[in-house]
Amino acid sequence: MNKHTVIVIVASIAIAGSIVFSSWNIFSADQIQFKAVKQNFSYFELLNNGKISICNPLPFYADFDTVKIFMIYEGRNIGVLGLSGVFLEPNSEIEIQGKFTSDSFKEIQYLSLHFDAMYNDVIPTRIDQEKMNIVTEIQTKIIGFIPYSISNQYPSFEFWKMMEDNNKEYSC
């Protein structure tokens, strides 16, 4: 076999492997699960501590550039928890520390305390729950250089229940 044929075969295998791994990352980004590290989830704890558990229920590795959790209130971004360099082993979970940033930290603190108390039935509902949404955005690269992101939007109470694992859907 001449050396050009070998080079073409090796290059083809490398390209095919990159495409398969990239496709798997895109698929797994939609399958990963989030949960609070502590038993009782708190928005206030999330923005001050920035720690969450991430589960990869699939039998293959998953690698993401960044995972961001945006807090959207009345249609505007009031804060984001950023996690970078997330690498998940098959059928495993990790606890990861992120950094929370906000332009209006006092506002997000007030809202997080209010929603935590409201969802724990400590105070009556005073703020419309429909005004706050949580958006998760997972960014990865296709073939190592083409950026791709997957976003999911949750109403604040649905996200709170997911982090509490009330539905027992967390697989790890």
Image (spheres, rainbow, N blue to C red):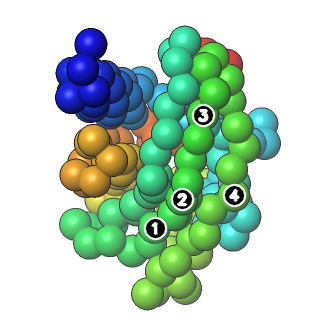
Q: First in sequence, mark 4 or 1: give its number.
A: 1
Left or right, 20 with respect to 170, comes to: left
Residue 167 occupies quadrant: top right
Q: Amino acid at mark 4?
A: Gln
User: Mark 1 = which residue?
Assistant: 80
Q: Is residue 23 visible?
A: no
| Foreground pick, 118 / 49 | 49
Q: CA distance from mark 4 to mark 1?
A: 13 Å
Residue 63's spot in the image, x, y percent? 49, 39
> Quick check: 81 above or below 104?
above
User: Mark 2 = which residue?
Assistant: 84
Q: Amino acid at mark 2?
A: Ser
User: Mark 4 = which residue?
Assistant: 97
The reply to whether discs 4 and 1 touch (Cβ–Cβ < 8 Å) is no
Q: CA distance from mark 3 to mark 2?
A: 12 Å
Residue 58's spot in the image, x, y percent? 51, 15
Q: CA distance from mark 3 to mark 4?
A: 14 Å
| Foreground pick, 43 / 151 | 151
Q: Is residue 138 visible?
A: yes
Q: First in sequence, mark 2 or 4: give its number.
A: 2
Residue 35 occupies quadrant: top right
Q: CA distance from mark 2 to mark 1?
A: 13 Å
Residue at the farthest front position:
2
User: Mark 3 = which residue?
Assistant: 88
Disc 2 element: strand
Q: First in sequence, mark 1 or 3: give its number.
A: 1
